[in-house]
Amino acid sequence: MAKLLYRLGLHCARHRLTVLFSWAAVLALLGVTAITGMRFGDGAFDIPGTESSKAMESLETEFPSSTTEGSASLQFVLRTPDGSTISQNPYAAELTELLDAAKSISNVSGVVSPLDPARPFISQGQTTAVATFNFTDITEANAESVYSEAEKLAETARDAGFEAQIGGALTSPLPEILGPSEIVGALIAFAVLFITFGSLVAAGANMLTALLGVVVGVLGIFASSAFLQPIGSMTPILAVMLGLAVGIDYSLFIVARFRSELREGRELHTAIGRSVGTAGSSVIFAGATVIIALAALSIVNIPFITEMGLAAALAVFIAVLMALTLLPVFLAFMGYKALPTRERPDSGTPIQVHKQKDTTKVGILEKWASVVVYKPVRSLIAGFVLLAVLAIPVLSLQTALNTPGGDDPESSQRRAYNIIAEEFGAGSQNPLVVLVESKDAVQAHASEMQTILLTLDNVQMVAPPQISQSGTAALISVLPAEGPAEDSTKDLVHDIRERATNLGAAVSVTGETAVSIDVDQKLSEALVTYIAVIVGLALILLIILFRSILVPLIATLGFLLSLGAGIGVTVAVFQWGWADTIIAAPTGSPMLSLLPILIVGILFGLAMDYQVFLVSRMREAYVKGWSPREAILDGFSKSAFIVVAAAAIMAAVFGGFALSPSPLVASIALALTIGVLADAFIVRMVIVPATLSLLGRSAWWIPSWLDKALPNLDTEGHALDTHDAASNQEAPREMATTR
């Protein structure tokens, strides 16, 4: 592999314009396709194979919705002060005036009064009334102004003495891909690059490669929607987040190796080829682990999660491709400007060869490594205890597919939801839908099912069956006694399904609550399989890379510690409400149920990046004959500063997204921020070297039969060293012949 990548880097460096024009053509083609054909989906959940999903399809057929595009509704929740009722003046008169005023709100198509005898919506104590405002032609452009008019009406109601809240939302706005906080994170990442390299040109080339990779990746995702299917609003955000972070890191690793080759006196093009041939190998393996982890999200078989995983995998693939092809072009253009000014040669001749260690990048890190290597037991205990403490909040993790009442506990939408739950029952806003299907006697089967439902525990109300026009299906609405996230509601869904098995008709349970339960169950079942697949495939790659059994196992166990820390801190912030003054997104609600599996996939791939970057240098020294501890110290001194810079860059990028107002984006980003920092600084720079020091030579043991069976990919670049040696021996012979 080293020779192949060497030739690739050399070819790109020598044919700069061809490579640049090729990428420019790709960028232009994707851009035109994306602009003319990209499509966004509605973000709806579709879980193939589950009972609730199949029932939803039947509902759409048997009970087609009359809603049209642009239609929406809001709830107008009014509650009187203590001791007063809606039916008494002045509140009865005020209610009538408020409902009349609601008809003048822009785009209102109808106002459903809570006093309507056909559909009364007044609490038993006559203290709370809920009106419904129906709207047409709602768009992203006018939704905010229409909602503001409804809020003004609620303010008028408060002035009249009501407790008034607006429930529901008119649209689901698309989260912004790059907001101010994300841009600040990218600027911090650039500052870290400049500090690391001491060269504005090197930092700029690194950042430019990553940004171009993100642009190509995102345009590719948009363009694919023109031919495949509409994409969800979250899909490009995850791709940008990961593409930018890994793109910077992968380019960083190659640029750092390029500078090292220049310092050793290599000719410019040779230095480029060797940096791609050696560091590029690690980039390929690191990128492969991330891509495997993301693509394997398709195992969950939830389309929008599969879409997010594949899109992010594409962004990572483009980042790898950019680092291997476009970055060598930039390296060729900047030449010795990649080095700090004081280290550049005065002319175009190679700089003086110096084999001594580069003391500008070590010091504290060398002392760190010495403490870890020579006091491994204490280091292991300290690292483990720290990560275990950060992981404690995981024990109280609560998940939900959707947060009842909206994400923000302080919003009018959540307050309206809570008032209705208090006055009309916790399950009144999340009914279960029981679908009875039969080719004959549907009415009889539905009545029998209604009788069964009335005998079940945790049922607040059962509505009379509605028969479809075809006469082959009946719909029964069931209000649970408690909220959608309660265990009793989950038990009720399972009870309905069990009791309906002997009815003589096909009975299924659907609705938002049932869908949430099915998704949670599917995610739980898939998580174990998912972890087994990504860990298994990654172990195979790492065994090939490190030619060791224990090193990949240690890497995987360390990942579990950093995963616990990342999710633990996220639970403390978003579920417990810690640091809510810093985080822009709403806190205090259960975590989204898809968060754990997304974090597992993404963080596993990123954790293996640092394992590859750090331990590959240790193995390189060990293979050259260094003792285990010397190899650890040498590899640490050569690559730890890169890992520190890479982790700081990823933390800056993810930290910017952690300040997003979207709870899903922010929670994923925060978990990745903490997970990356914990993995880089504690797992890879404390626990892994300490464990390798304790194991000694046994850490690099591999059965001889397996060693022979594995392909030799030469990721350390030994073939390049042999090639250089042969070239050096051949040169004097050619000179003698010439003479």
Image: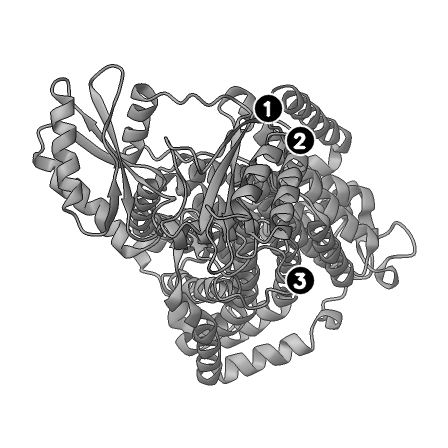
Q: Which residue is mark 2?
A: 142
> Which residue is pictured at 63% across the width and 81% down the height?
367
Counting residues from the N terminus, which is met first, the one under dot 1 or under dot 2? 1
Q: Is residue 146 visible?
A: yes
Q: Which residue is mark 1?
A: 137
Relative to 579, is 465 above or below? Answer: above
Crowding at dot 1, Cα within 10 Å, few <14 / some 14-19 / many 20+, comes out as some
Residue nearest the viewer, comparing 122 with 206: 122
Residue nearest the viewer, comparing 298 with 470: 470
Numbered disc 2: secondary structure: loop
| x and y percentages locating residue 488 in the rendered image | 25, 54
| Quarter of the figure that contains the C terminus | top right
Residue mark closest to the camera, 1 vs 3: 1
Looking at the rendered structure, the kind of residue marked 2 is Asn
| For residue 15, side relative to residue 720 (left or right) | right
> Which residue is pictured at 51% across the width and 84% down the height?
374
Q: CA distance from mark 1 to mark 3?
A: 50 Å
Q: Which residue is mark 3?
A: 645
Looking at the rendered structure, the kind of residue marked 3 is Ala
